[in-house]
Image (cartoon, helix red, strand yellow):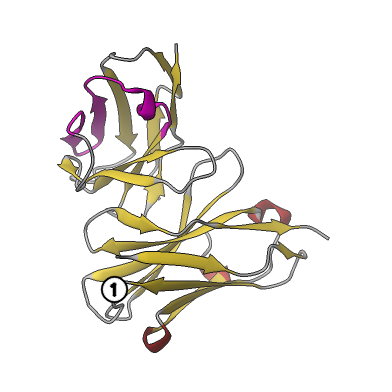
Amino acid sequence: QITLKESGPTLVKPTQTLTLTCTFSGFSLSTRAVDVAWIRQPPGKAPEWLALIRGNDDEIYSPSLKTRLTITKDTSRSQVVLTMTNMDPVDTATYFCAHRLTLRGLDYWGQGTPVTVSS
Amino acid sequence: DIQMTQSPSTLSASVGDRVTITCRASQSISSWLAWYQQKPGIAPKLLIYEASTLESGVPSSFSGSGSGTEFTLTISSLQPDDFATYHCQQYKNGWTFGQGTKVEIK
C-alpha cells in the first residue's frame, strides 16, 4: 500500500525559505522507474507542478521556478525534501507530493499541506 | 513552455448525461497526457494516463482519446459521484496542468 504525507510549516514570512518533507511508504525511490513529484495548488486555482526526482537521482524543475527550488531524496528514510527560497505571498497554496511510475500519471498523492506566506 | 487549455470551464449536466471535456496543447505532446478528477479539499485522483489508458479501479464510464494537440475526456453516463473538477496534464516536456473544468449539477 503506497502512502505519502507532506509536512512542514503552515506559515512563512516573505523572503524566507520554505522546507517541505514528503515521507512515503510502500515503494522504494531507488528504482529507476519511480518518481516523486511536488505540486502546489493556490486556493481556487489549477495545480502547478514544481519539481520531480527520479529513482536514478535525476532532478527536473519547473522552468519558471527553477532558480528557487531544490529537490532531494533520502532513500534510507523514505523522504523527499523540497526547498523553495525567497517566498512571496503569491506562493500561498496547498503543497502536495505524489508518486508516479515513469511515463504514467500521478497515481498516489499525499493529503497536501497548506502554506501561507504572510508577514 | 507548453500551455494546456481546457474547455468548457464549467459544464452543467444531469445524472445520466454523456459529458465531453476538451483539452488542447499549445504544441504536440504525442500521447503524454493524463486526466484527473478533483473534489474540494482533496488531492486530484488519476483517471487516465497516456491519453487513453484507464487507471486501475477507475470506472469504465470514463474514457480518453486524442493525440498530438487535441484530447478529450468522456464520461458516458454521469453519476452523482462524478460532479467534480477535471484537470488535464501534459508530461511531454516538463509538466503543465489545464485550468480545470467544473462539472456541476444542472
Q: Chain of mark 1?
A: A
Q: Residue at x 29, y 42 (%)?
A: B27
Q: Position of residue B55 (x, y in %)?
A: 21, 47
Q: Residue at x 34, y 15 (%)?
A: B15
Label 1 residue SS: loop
Q: Position of residue A26 (x, y in %)?
A: 30, 71
Q: How many marks?
A: 1
Q: Position of residue A82 (x, y in %)?
A: 52, 72
In the picture as drawn, the residue positioned furthest to the bottom comes out as A76
Magenta-colored span:
B60-85
Identify residue for label 1: A27
Q: From what the image shows, is residue A48 above or below residue A18?
A: above
Q: Is residue B105 magenta?
A: no
For the residue marked with disc 1, what is the amino acid?
Phe
Residue placed most toward the observer, B75 or A66: B75
Q: Is residue B71 magenta?
A: yes
Left or right of A23 in this view: B25: left
Left or right of B54 in this view: A74: right
Q: Is residue A62 visible?
A: no
Q: From what the image shows, is residue B86 above or below residue A49?
A: above
